[in-house]
Image (spheres, rainbow, N blue to C red):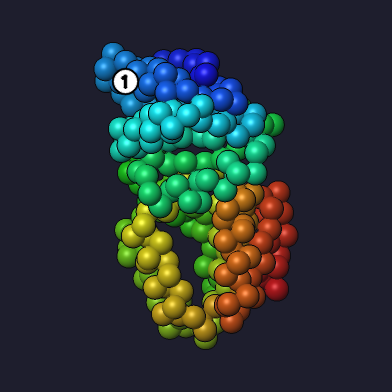
Amino acid sequence: MFETTIDREHNLIIATAEQTLSEADFEGLSDCINEYINTTDRAPGIVLHAAQFPHWKNAAAMVAHFKLVRDHQKVLPKVALVSDNSTLASMPALVDFFVQAKIRHFQEQDFDKAVSWARLTDNDDTAVRMIEGLPADVLAYELIGTVSSRDYEEILGPLVKEKLKKHDKLKVLVVAGDGFDGATAGALWDDARLGLRHLTGFSKIALVSDIRWLRQASKLFGPMMPGQLHVFDLDQREEAIAWIKS
């Protein structure tokens, strides 16, 4: 079953799942979300808390689960998954490609961070924040929010092109902290095109992030890149800066 807590002040619904979930459980959560939207005229952020990976009671429960996702994925702004379960940890990297809601995984100890993230309000500004004070051959930026094609077309692409006119090789520093929500499908394609177009133009890339799926993806594709790729924890930001400057 789900135990739900509604926080209208922060536009948030927290749902704690037990190990076995029935058709009625998913229908009840769906009704809770619908009632909230209808009475407040706002789509809430969702925090799904599951100490263990929850199981469907039967096939009807599975169908109800898929129906809940289908009916709400284009409406809900954010879904935070809170669990130490390794299966749930891999879900955001997979699900983000198929649903519109932004999804992130948090460990049990980071429950408060999950709540804070789920209730954040996004704006329409660019997701790229430039980091100043580094050498001219370094492209340094922080990712906040959801990276879109616009960020590549209007900011990153032109910056790379302009810097490569003055430098044979570039160094790149990317910081993705708690405020980073991922990228749209178009941005992922633009990122791949940018990398292929300037494949030999980067001598060093430093990724500073604690986001598991982002770190895993970087380590997976790192060996395929001609330049050096080093992944740092968020609290190693100064070490990353020192490495990228060396």
| Quarter residue 85 falls in | top right
Quarter of the image with the C terminus is bottom right
Is residue 169 or residue 64 the one in the foreground? 64
For badge 1, the amino acid type reads Asn
| Residue at the spot 45% in from the left edge and 20% down from the top edge | 25
Q: Is residue 42 above or below residue 94?
A: above
Q: Is residue 119 visible?
A: no
Is residue 147 or residue 109 the one in the foreground? 109
| Residue at the spot 31% in from the left edge and 20% down from the top edge | 34
| Quarter residue 150 falls in | bottom left
Q: Which x, y percent locates residue 143? A: 49, 52
The answer to whether 104 appears left or right of 123 in the picture is right
| Residue at the spot 61% in from the left edge and 58% down from the top edge | 216
| Quarter residue 39 falls in | top left
Q: Which x, y percent locates residue 9? A: 43, 16
Instruction: Please name the residue that numbered disc 1 is placed on.
Output: 34
Q: Which x, y percent locates residue 239? A: 73, 60
Q: Which x, y percent locates residue 72? A: 33, 32
The tally of labels here is 1
* Other-residue count near label 1 (Cα within 10 Å), few / some / many at <14 / 14–19 / ≥20: some
